[in-house]
Image (cartoon, rainbow, N blue to C red):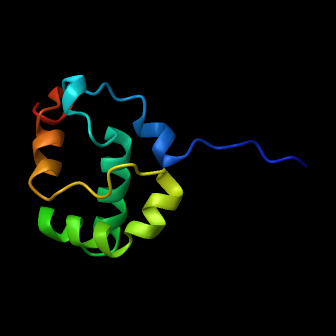
Amino acid sequence: MIAKPTPSIIHHFSSIKDPRVNRQKKHQLQDIFFISICAVICGADNWVAIEEFGRAKEEWFTEVLGLKHGISEAYYIPFTIYSMPEFCK
């Protein structure tokens, strides 16, 4: 029996419209979501902890996600997420 492929977390979040201006898109939105989810699952409970987790695992995230600009800074993560209408309702 051949298993059907299942969508990945990254694929799931890639369908969310990114409201940021193109020149401000240093990090892919789905990468920010993926790193944030991984960090929270591992115990991060604030934006700084998410950044610290990302930096601690940066080599792995770079390999998996193909990061070009490293890990997003803590102040930028909530700015990105809260700028999205889906999260402001």
Above or below residue 60? Residue 72 is: above
State how many labels appear. Answer: 0
Above or below residue 22? Residue 73 is: below
| Image coordinates for residue 56, horizontal then vertical, percent | 32, 76
Using the rendered view, name the quadrant where residue 43 is placed: bottom left
Residue 46 visible to an observer of this rendering:
no
Q: Residue at x 91, y 49 (%)?
A: 1
| Image coordinates for residue 11, horizontal then vertical, percent | 50, 39
| Residue furthest right as drawn | 1
| Image coordinates for residue 18, horizontal then vertical, percent | 27, 28
| Image coordinates for residue 33, horizontal then vertical, percent | 32, 48
Above or below residue 3? Residue 54 is: below
Above or below residue 6? Residue 39 is: below
Looking at the image, residue 27 sits to the left or right of residue 14; the answer is left
Residue 14 visible to an observer of this rendering:
yes
Q: Nearer the viewer, residue 49 or 12?
A: 49
Using the rendered view, name the quadrant where residue 54 is placed: bottom left
Quadrant showing the C terminus: top left
Q: Residue at x 17, y 57 (%)?
A: 73
Q: Residue at x 14, y 59 (%)?
A: 74
Looking at the image, residue 66 sits to the left or right of residue 76; the answer is right
Looking at the image, residue 88 sits to the left or right of residue 38; the answer is left
Q: Nearer the viewer, residue 36 or 73?
A: 73
